[in-house]
Image: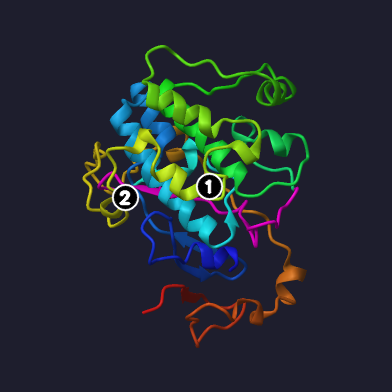
């Protein structure tokens, strides 16, 4: 399974999928599924933090996404508030699979240093081999942010931040319920083998944790549970649930190299399910659809 296949997982509700795209004269355009409810970062900035039932709901749907990827030997490696979007009904969609690593399961590991600093697991910082454990660490950071309204670790710079992640204990507000605190502590365990979600029965351990005691997992997977919050969308084209910084950003295209374009191999795109048979390289548009009709 390559990254194109990951985002083609249209039979799975909680991943943001690849829609259509086209070739211009010198560029390839990918068009993603349109999800207009904003990301969790934007939503949490509006309210400071989520009430526990809201955090439980989002955490459970995100967990289902992690179960799906891990069951296919994929480590996500970039779980964060910014990469979890809400659709128009309030269900989550996990986006941005650029850091995914395939073929990681059982004893197979990787050592690439990557991720978003606040969410990077201790084993990555220490250059140790890792697997899906790094996703459950990032999940713990995200869960803490939803419940508390701020990251569990901080520092003046990356060096201080990484030192905090590897060496410091997490402080938990007294306002957190016992279940919330224990769940965060489980995911933010520094030793990967002892981390919640990383044991022999990792998925079961997550599903049966008291924090999720009110979740009907089967109904949730079928999207039969009503979300606790429905994004306000006055016009689906406005993107009003996204930060104005992004909405007002100027579009800039990456410069192209004509010499490279002249020697481009059209067969590099043969795996797409549809290509326009009338496409003429560099002279007209080529349209493809990665969905099976």
Q: Main secondary structure of the magenta part?
A: loop
On screen, residue 68 above or below 234: below
136 sits left or right of 165 in the view: left
The disc, 1 or 2, on the residue closer to the chain's N-terminal end is 2
Picture coordinates of residue 218 (x, y %)? 29, 54
Q: Residue furthest top?
A: 174
Mark 1 closeness class: few <14, some 14–19, many ≥20 residues within 10 Å: few
Mark 2 closeness class: few <14, some 14–19, many ≥20 residues within 10 Å: some
On screen, residue 103 above or below 228: below
Would residue 243 be seen by someone viewing this image from the given angle? no
Picture coordinates of residue 252 (x, y %)? 58, 48
The residue shown at (29%, 50%) is 220
Q: Residue 217: which numbered mark, if any?
A: 2
Would residue 140 be seen by someone viewing this image from the given angle? yes
Q: Secondary structure at mark 2?
A: helix
Magenta span of residues: 88-111
Q: Residue furthest bottom?
A: 277
Which residue is tagged 1?
A: 251
The reply to whether the magenta stretch includes residue 89 is yes
């Amino acid at each position: 399974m390559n990254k194109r296949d990951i985002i083609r997982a249209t039979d799975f509700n909680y991943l943001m999928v690849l829609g259509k795209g086209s070739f211009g004269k010198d560029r390839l355009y990918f068009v993603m599924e349109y999800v207009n409810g904003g990301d969790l970062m934007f939503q949490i900035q509006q309210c400071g933090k989520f009430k526990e039932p809201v955090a439980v709901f989002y955490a459970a749907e995100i967990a289902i996404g992690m179960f799906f990827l891990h069951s296919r030997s994929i480590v996500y490696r970039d779980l964060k508030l910014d990469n979890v979007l809400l659709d128009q009904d309030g269900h989550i969609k996990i986006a941005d699979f650029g850091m995914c690593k395939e073929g990681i399961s059982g004893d197979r590991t990787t050592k690439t240093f990557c991720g978003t600093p606040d969410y990077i697991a201790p084993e990555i910082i220490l250059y140790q081999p890792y697997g899906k454990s790094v996703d459950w660490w990032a999940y713990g950071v995200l869960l803490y942010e939803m419940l508390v309204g701020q990251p569990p670790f901080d520092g003046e710079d990356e060096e201080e931040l990484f030192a905090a992640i590897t060496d410091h204990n997490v402080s938990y507000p007294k306002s957190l319920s016992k279940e919330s605190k224990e769940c965060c502590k489980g995911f933010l365990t520094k030793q990967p083998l002892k981390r919640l979600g990383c044991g022999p029965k990792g998925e079961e351990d997550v599903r049966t944790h008291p924090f999720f005691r009110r979740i009907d997992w089967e109904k949730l997977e079928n999207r039969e549970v009503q979300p606790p919050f429905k994004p306000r969308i006055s016009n689906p084209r406005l993107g009003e649930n996204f930060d104005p910084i992004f909405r007002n950003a100027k579009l800039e295209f990456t410069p192209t190299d004509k010499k490279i374009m002249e020697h481009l191999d059209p067969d590099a795109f043969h795996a797409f399910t549809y290509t326009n048979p009338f496409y003429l390289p560099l002279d007209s548009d080529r349209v493809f659809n990665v969905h099976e009709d």
